[in-house]
Image (spheres, rainbow, N blue to C red):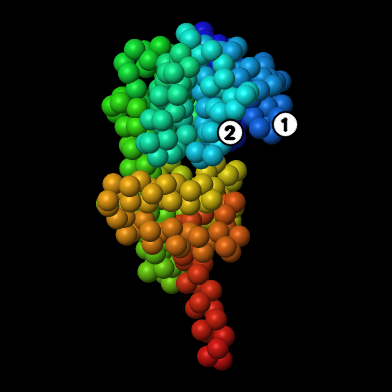
Amino acid sequence: MARIGIAGIGRMGRAMAERLLEKGHEVTAWNRSPEKVEPLLALGARRAETPRALAEGSEVVLSILTDPAAIEAVYGGEQGILSADLSGRTVVEMSTVRPQVQIELGQRVRAAGGGFVECPVGGTTGPARQGRLIGLLGGEESDIAAVRPVLEDLCRRIEHAGPVGAGAAMKLAINLPLLLFYQAFGEAMTLCRHLGRDPAWLVDLFADSSGGPNVLRTRGPSIALALAGGEPGPVTFDVDLVRKDLRTMLEEARARGAELPLTARALEIYDRAAAESWGSKDAATLAAYWPSKAAAAAATEAGGSR
C-alpha cells in the first residue's frame, strides 16, 4: 500500500480519495477550501496544511484541479508542491488541460527531483468511486511503473498514450464528441418531441441504435429525467466545466493551426445556457437545453396566435 497525497478535493478528488482509502492506501488530502477535506477525515484520511506538506508526506502525489491557474497556485509559491524536495516521489497530474501545461509542469517537477506522469481520466465520480475510470497516461515507462499499482486501483483501463502531453491530447480528443453529442441529441429530440413519447423510451431506443453512444447506456436515466423536466441527480460534471473543456479544445486547435467549427458553435450555445442559469447543472441536462428552447418558442408562438 502507498502513502498518497491528493491535492484538489472537488467532486472527483473526493471520489478518488474514498476509493483509495477503501483499497487500504494511506491518504493525505489538501484543498484550498479546508472544509472539503472534513468528510474524508472520518474515513481515515489525514489533512495536510499546505501543498508542500502534502508532497513531503507522500510517496505519490495526485492532483486533479480545475485549470492552469489552479495548477500554478498549488504547485508554485513558497508552500507549493514544487517547493518540496521531490526526490523519490512521483507526481501524477490528472487535470483536463492543454498538453503544453503538462509538459511544462513535468519539466518543473523533474527539476525538483521528482518523477512525473500525467493521467487525465475518462469517467466521472461514479466510475472513480468504483475504480472504473480510463487512465490516459503520458510519461516515461519508469515513472509509470512506480505509480501503476495506485492507478490500477482507480482505473479499469490504463493506456500509455506516449510522452508527457500525449495524455492531455487524448483526453481533449475523447471528450470532444461527448460534449458535442449533448447538443446533437437535444436537436434530435426537437424533431420527435411532438410525438409525446416517454423520454426514457426515447433514450432507450437511441441507445440501441447507430445514433447512441456509450453515454446513453451509462447516463441514460439521468438524461431521460432531464428531458422530462426533472433533476438528474447529484451533479458529477457541471456545465461550466463543459464550457471550460470546450475552450481548452479550441485553444489547443488554434495553437496547432486548426479550426473546430462544431466545437466553437457548441460552446456558443452552452455559453447561452450558462447565462440562463444552467452553469451549475449537471452536463446530462445539456441534452434537455435545446428542446426546452424549442418548447418555449412554440409556446410563445401559440400564445401569440390566440
Q: Residue at x 61, y 30 (%)?
A: 9
Q: Name the residue under label 1.
A: 35
202 relative position to 74: left or right = left
Contact? badges 2 and 1 (CB < 8 Å): no
Which amino acid is tagged 2? Answer: Ala
Residue 163 in view (yes/no): yes
113 relative position to 166: left or right = right
**Mark on residue 73?**
2
> Which is nearer the eye, 241 or 98?
98
Q: Is residue 206 above or below residue 92?
A: below
Residue 234: x and y, percent?
60, 43
Q: Which residue is drawn at 53% across and 74% down?
A: 296
**Mark on residue 171?**
none
Q: In this view, does 113 lie above or below 174?
A: above
Residue 253: x and y, percent?
32, 49
**Mark pair 2, 1: CA separation:** 18 Å
> Which is nearer the eye, 191 or 77?
77
Tell which circle, 2 or 1, labels the residue nearer the N-terminal end.
Answer: 1
Which amino acid is tagged 1? Answer: Glu
Residue 220: x and y, percent?
45, 47
Q: Residue at x 48, y 56 (%)?
A: 286
Foreground: disc 2 or disc 1? 2
Q: In this view, does 273 lie above or below 237?
A: below
Image label count: 2
Q: Neighbour class for label 2 at 10 Å: few (<14), some, many (≥20)?
A: some
Numbered disc 1: secondary structure: helix
Numbered disc 2: secondary structure: helix
Q: The C terminus is located in which quarter?
A: bottom right
Q: Which residue is drawn at 63% across and 23% down?
A: 79
